[in-house]
Image: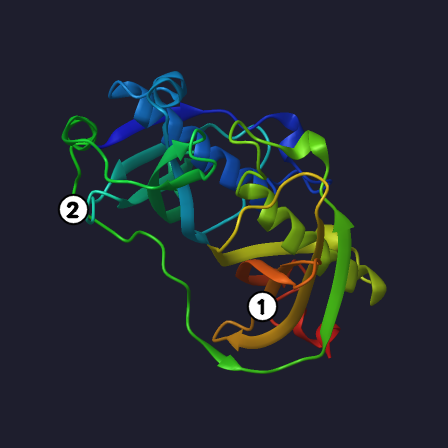
């Protein structure tokens, strides 16, 4: 079952260039997924009542073009399959002015709360009722990263403490914020090189989550250039590490970025 969903990007989602930030595109993807789930009888309140949830494991996004403020936006989304009744890929296409602007392939894990056992949440098989409600459509993936050639660069580091006001309904950091952190780390390198980071253009990204991040934890984002695409865009790797004893890798990411100045203009800033 595919769902067409009207969406709205709020004013705060846009940069000084009046184009939507990559992290806020991700939040629109999440809105589309929640509406699609609610339409088949599974709103957030029902998940909470039944003590279950879906948490994202991996996410790949391709930005086909930037979305300008004021453009009409809509999403189309569907679930591709359920593997072992636990893992489900979801596809999302975001349209702006009826043109595909961004596509996402997400991989979600069905989990059950185990608060009484003191285990928080753990992977669990979804019910037949839930799977039947989503009526999977075996199409996708709609987003795959472009290929690139290797081009290593030095590592930069960005350290911060997670805010309590960043917590989501599951009491951990919601997944779009990880991309915000990666782009902030990149922006600081760009600014240090004397270039306006507002001129950064998102091309594509991939994130794999390994452990939840919660309020008060100290995170270090370790960023370095790892390659160059055929169009000249810069490929960056990010490790998001919890600074504790011992260190814990919370997530790893690849972001592909460029500057409005032209293809290939970003890479030299990471030398």
Above or below: residue 42 compared with residue 1: above
Above or below: residue 256 compared with residue 6: below
The colour scheme of the drawn protein is rainbow
Kindly check if marks 2 and 1 are in contact, taking CB atoms under 8 A apart as contact: no
Q: Tag 1's secondary structure? A: strand
Residue at the extreme front of the image, as rendered: 117
Q: Earlier in the sequence, mark 2 or mark 1?
A: 2
Tell me, for residue 190, which label it has, or none.
Answer: none
Mark 1, residue position: 237
Q: Nearer the viewer, residue 59 or 57?
A: 57
The percent coordinates of residue 158 (x first, y second) are: 76, 59
Judged left or right of residue 42, residue 201 is right
Q: Is residue 128 visible?
A: yes
Quadrant of the snapshot with the C terminus: bottom right
Tell me, for residue 138, which label it has, or none.
Answer: 2
Judged left or right of residue 204, residue 131 is left
The percent coordinates of residue 193 (x first, y second) are: 82, 67
> For residue 93, what is the image quadrant?
top left
Judged left or right of residue 177, residue 271 is right
Q: Nearer the viewer, residue 40 or 8?
A: 40
Residue at 28 percent of width and 53 percent of height: 141
Residue at 58 percent of width and 83 percent of height: 151
Q: Nearer the viewer, residue 120 or 38?
A: 120
Above or below: residue 255 compared with residue 28: below
Quadrant of the snapshot with the N terminus: top left
Q: Is residue 102 visible?
A: no
Residue at 70 percent of width and 58 percent of height: 244
Residue at 81 percent of width and 60 percent of height: 191
The percent coordinates of residue 126 (x first, y second) are: 23, 35
Q: Mark 2: few, some, or many residues within 10 Å (few <14, many ≥20)?
A: few
Report the Cα–Cα distance between label 2 and label 1: 31 Å
């Amino acid at each position: 079952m595919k769902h067409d969903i009207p969406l709205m990007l709020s004013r705060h989602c846009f940069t000084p260039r009046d184009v939507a930030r990559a992290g806020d595109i991700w939040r629109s993807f999440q809105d589309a997924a929640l509406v699609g789930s609610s339409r088949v009888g599974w709103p957030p309140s029902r998940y909470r009542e039944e003590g279950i949830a879906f948490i994202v494991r991996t996410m790949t996004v391709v930005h086909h073009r930037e979305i300008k403020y004021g453009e009409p936006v809509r999403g189309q989304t569907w679930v591709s399959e359920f593997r072992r009744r636990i893992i489900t890929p979801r596809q999302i296409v975001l349209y702006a002015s009826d043109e595909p602007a961004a596509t996402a392939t997400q991989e979600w894990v069905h989990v059950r709360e185990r608060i009484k056992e003191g285990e928080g949440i753990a992977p669990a098989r979804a019910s037949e009722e839930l799977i039947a409600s989503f009526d999977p459509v075996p199409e996708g993936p709609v987003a795959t990263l472009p290929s690139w050639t290797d081009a290593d660069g030095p590592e930069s580091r960005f350290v911060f403490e997670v805010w309590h006001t960043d917590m989501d309904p599951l009491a951990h950091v919601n997944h779009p914020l990880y991309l915000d952190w990666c782009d902030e780390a990149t922006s600081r390198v760009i600014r240090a090189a004397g270039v306006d980071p507002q001129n950064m253009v998102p091309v594509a990204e991939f994130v794999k989550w390994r452990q939840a991040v919660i309020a008060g934890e100290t995170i270090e984002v370790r960023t370095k250039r790892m390659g160059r695409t055929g169009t000249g865009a810069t490929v960056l790797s990010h490790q998001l590490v919890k600074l504790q004893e011992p260190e814990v890798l919370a997530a790893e990411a690849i972001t592909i970025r460029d500057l409005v100045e032209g293809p290939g203009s970003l890479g030299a800033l990471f030398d």
